[in-house]
Amino acid sequence: MEKLFTIIVDYKGGTYISQYSASNIKSLKEKWIEEELPKLTALAGFNSYQVSNIKERMFNEEEIKYENLINVWNNDLGTISKYFFSMIIINTEKI
């Protein structure tokens, strides 16, 4: 069964928010890379090395569940082109 996820990316002073339905976080990240990363690349001006680096880090870094919060994870990718890249993933309940 697919769940609705909200993804909040903080990068270079900007906040980028998107939502996708996926069965798990791995498939969510695949969708985000396919659909959202090209948009963010255009906005942030990532080069091909930075895009590859983001993709690699997304799958090599383990999400960290926030203590005392339900269905919220953080996936900090570290520094991309001198700026910190942070991703928060929220399993959002559909209303």
Image: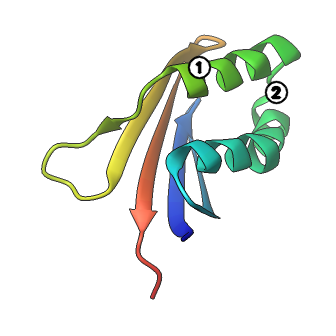
Lateral position of residue 38 relative to residue 61, left or right? right
Q: Residue type at mark 1?
A: Arg
Q: Name the foreground residue: 12 vs 20.
A: 20
Mark closer to the chain start, 2 or 1:
2
Query: Which residue reaches farthest left?
Result: 68
Of the pair 91 and 45, the residue shown nearer to us: 91
Q: Residue 38: which disc?
A: none
Count neighbours of disc 2 (C-alpha within 10 A) and say few if under 14, some if 14 to 19, many if 20 or more.
few
Q: In which quarter of the image is residue 51?
A: top right
Q: Name the residue under label 2.
A: 45
| Residue at the (59%, 20%) spot, across then down | 57
Separation of residues labelled 2 and 1 (CA atoms): 18 Å
Q: What element carries label 2?
A: loop
* Residue 86 drawn at (x, y percent): 48, 32
Quarter of the image where the N terminus is located: bottom right
**Total numbered labels:** 2
Q: Residues within 10 Å of mark 1 (few under 14, many from 20)?
A: some
Q: Residue at x 24, y 43 (%)?
A: 66
| Residue at image coords 42%, 61% | 91
| Left or right of 90, for residue 46 | right
Q: Position of residue 28 (x, y in %)?
A: 61, 50
Residue in the foreground of this view, choosing between 80 and 31 = 31
Give the vertical position of 43 relative to 19 (above or below): above
Circle 1 sits in a helix, a strand or a loop, which is it?
helix
Q: In this picture, is 71 found above or below 63? A: below
In the picture, the disc for residue 57 is: 1
Amino acid type, label 2: Gly
Q: Residue sitting at 62 percent across and 43 percent down? A: 29
